[in-house]
Amino acid sequence: MESLPLEDVTFTDSISIEDYNGLREAVDWMLVKPRRAEIALAHSFYLCVAIYGGRPVGMVRVVSDGGWSFLITDVIVKPEYQGRHIGKKMITMALEYIEKDLLPGESVMISLMSAYKKEGFYEKFGFHKRPFGNHGSGMSAWMTRNEAGEIVTEKEV
């Protein structure tokens, strides 16, 4: 692994749909249809994109109601740049953004769905695996409208 000083990585708050899907493709995630990607990126509560050599090498998004509920999503670092503290820096920046207007005595819930076997990375930031305490299992579902116009769920896709 060649040296990559974190000081050489810059961070921005925008990304093209093509670059967004390029990052997703780099980690073998499904691509997001352009219309859906445009809506998602435009409605992000917080967006941080890591740039190296003029190209995106990582990103993180936060979606929120702006009150007490936050979801960290799209945590991506291209495989060839992993292990260089880019992900750590982006998560730290996202958490600091959430913290900035949290007043004494207030609480917020920050959720995320970890990629498989990546839970240890998030535990370093105080996240815990579910179930935990009175928190049940994390759950998700995919809903797709197929070409015939029918709605199908993950089990049927």
Image (cartoon, grey):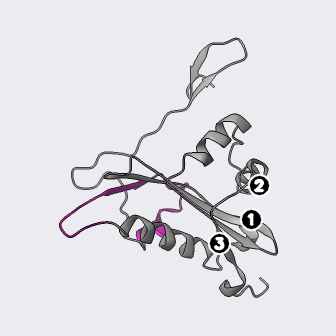
Q: Which residues make up the magenta segment?
A: 102-123
Q: Where on the picture, by quarter, is residue 145?
A: top right
Specify few, some or many for label 3: CA neighbours under 10 Å numbering under 14, 14-19, or 20 or more. some
Amino acid at dot 2: Asp
Cβ atoms under marks 2 and 3 closer than 8 Å: no
Amino acid at dot 3: Phe
Q: Nearer the viewer, residue 130 or 8?
A: 8
Q: Nearer the viewer, residue 35 or 149?
A: 35
Q: Earlier in the sequence, mark 2 or mark 1?
A: 2
Q: Which residue is mark 3?
A: 11
Please determine whether, in this image, residue 48 is positioned above or below residue 154: below
Amino acid at dot 1: Pro
Q: Which residue is mark 1?
A: 56
Secondary structure, mark 2, is: helix
The percent position of residue 104, horizontal first and vertical second, equals 20, 70
Specify few, some or many for label 2: CA neighbours under 10 Å numbering under 14, 14-19, or 20 or more. some
Disc number lying in front (2 or 3) = 3
Cβ atoms under marks 2 and 1 closer than 8 Å: yes
Q: Is residue 101 left or right of residue 7?
A: left
Please determine whether, in this image, residue 48 is positioned above or below residue 65: below
Secondary structure, mark 3, is: strand
Q: Is residue 51 magenta?
A: no
The percent position of residue 129, horizontal first and vertical second, equals 37, 58
Q: Which corner quadrant holds the N terminus?
A: bottom right
Q: Which residue is mark 2?
A: 19
- The label number, if any, that marks residue 104 in the structure image: none
